[in-house]
Image: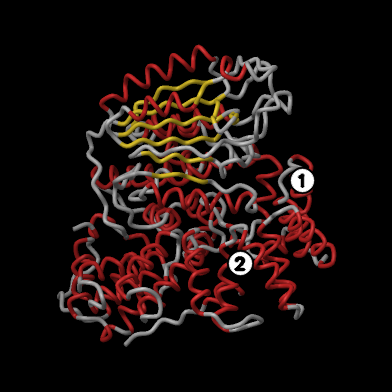
Amino acid sequence: MRAFLIGIACALLCPLIALAQGTQEKRIALIIGNSDYEQITPLDNPGNDATDMRVALEGLGFEVFLGLDATGDEMLRLTEQFAQAIKTADVSLFFYAGHGFQVGGQNYLVPTDARIQQATDVTEQTFRLNDVLSDMEQAPGIKFVFLDACRNDPFEGAVASVADGLARIGNAADFMISFATQPDNVAFDGTGRNSFFTEALLSHIYTPGLDVSDLMISVRRDVLAATGGRQIPWENSSLTRQFRFDPRPNTVSAETLLWQVAANAGDPQLMQLYADRYPHGRHTEEVLAFLDTAKDGNAAVARSVTPQERSAQENRLWQLARRARMRPLVQFYLDKYPDGAHVQEARRLIGTLPSEDEGGAGGRCERLATHPKDATANNAGVPFAVLKENAFNAILACNEAIAENPDLPHYTALLARATMAAGGQTQAIQLYREAATRGDLRAMFSLAFITEGQGDLPEALRLYQRAADLGSADAKINLAVALFNGAGVTQDPAQAVKILQEAADLGSAIANFNLGVLARDGDVGAPSDALAYFNNAINAGEPRAYVASAILLDEGREVPRDPVAAANMLLRGAVEDDGQSIAQMTQRTADWSRDTIAAVQERLKAAGFYTSTIDGRSGPNFVAALDAWRNGGFDADVLVE
């Protein structure tokens, strides 16, 4: 038996079945973004949010009705057109960004020309959300509602009956209604081009094969991280089937896809983009080695390619640029393929992507000081050793971000981390306490970690518990560790598993991985649940789960034996993990069935790397083929049966 160590404390302290989406699916969207209000406080980002969502959805096959700074009459006209269009739609989607509020449990969206001075003006001057929902109920397909409209009372108390946030809604079938934050709570407008909610939505909507429920977990995780837990997206779903905005199968992460594109192209600019975006990524060593060689003038000369290969390379680069939403990557595509098949869409996309200089102090503070545990799709986080090298600049940026965004204590938590990196421990602890008191989860967790290191375990557990109660997956896992081990609390494995499941539900990769290990060993639920947990861990970014899944599939342990699926997992792991999958296949070949290794060889042969006999055994040709596969040769097509 091959065992995996759980290693929960060390990790923190130091595919569902796809339902095919038809290519002829009729998708209709209504998008409204109201920023420039005439009588109430304008908002910075809703117009950008709506414009950028339009570009994204049109690229995903939606016909879009768009309203920017829409008056009451314009909103009425747009909703009537939308209601007519969705009568035969397979997918109907309504996205609204702007002011919204509730009165008596009813939600109202605010046109830009609204003039509300007393309670009786509410129904006359605003737009009832329920009217849109009623129209959507008549549509035959599935329906999505995204409401980035939960900002605070736009009338600043002038109308006594208005309450902050939006009320809980939704009980009709085949709906998913997504709020930027919890019902009755307030969302932030964002510190960059987009709101935190819309930015996260845009960052994940092009992930191939991602079911919409998993997409919202990713969105929630990113918004939690970006706001320090002050904003928690929420949804109410009555969907009766799965849905993927991009139905193509997902094979590797955006990080690995960037490495593969860069390695295939042999281009220093792409390699530098990888180094900038993923400074401590799983392929950073290979990237830095390439850049060092290129600096010495010894870069490999790119081989000539056929027109078919050029077309495939262009398409792969475009799919990556669209998914990763990196402005330099889109510009690279436009420069390299000025007459390419996706130029028109690329020009539209690049208009929605700000440069780093346009991110403001908040963006600079986040790039310089974010903890890797708070990584988002757009920010991999900064290891402490790297932060030490840039602590002065981080402190300047975070102080400026605090001044610009006084309502967001997360920048105080980032300032605390930068101050700690600069050697100011006493001041950093004070800043952490300030941010924690104001509800920042990273500050609570960091303060608990410091307190535990100082030997005050009861106070550390109290802080972990508070952070866990407010939604910190990291704090939940540390509490689970304490309960598993009986450290400072009565040992309670059942409660530990319950808390670990809560962390997994929040999208924690390590929680899902460890639940998979526990399920596999019969300690949680049924052993047959292990593969689903490992798949969730893969989707959340835990590369160790590839080998763990492959073992189950290879052995047929509590799941049907499937050497082909095991081979696919190993080959995906070969490009995603730190070398574990390749080591398993080449150094411990005898631990695997001949069928699985033979299936790996078949796929490497189909990709053009393996030329020896398909015999299920290791050898120099097999090792070389796997190295070529990892270092630029990955081909998703050979993994599709």
Q: Left or right: 4 with respect to 167? A: left
The residue at the point 60 percent across, 40 percent down is 184
Task: Describe residue 430's horizontal placement relative to residue 491 as left or right.
Answer: right
- Front residue of this view, candidates 103 and 60: 103
Q: Nearer the viewer, residue 94 or 607?
A: 94
Q: Quadrant of residue 348?
A: top left
Q: Residue at x 74, y 44 (%)?
A: 401
Q: For mark 2, does the 10 Å Cα neighbourhood hold few (<14), some (14 to 19), or many (20 or more) residues?
A: many
Residue 367: horizontal and vertical position, in percent? 64, 51
Residue 613 falls left or right of residue 129: left
Relative image position of residue 256 (x, y in whole percent): 42, 58
Residue pointed to by mark 1? 402
- Quadrant of the image occupied by residue 381: bottom right
Could you tell me which residue is drawn at 65 percent across and 53 percent down?
Answer: 228
Q: Which residue is mark 2?
A: 475
Q: Amino acid at mark 2?
A: Ala
| Amino acid at circle 1 | Ile
Placement of 454 over or under 271, stated as above or below: below
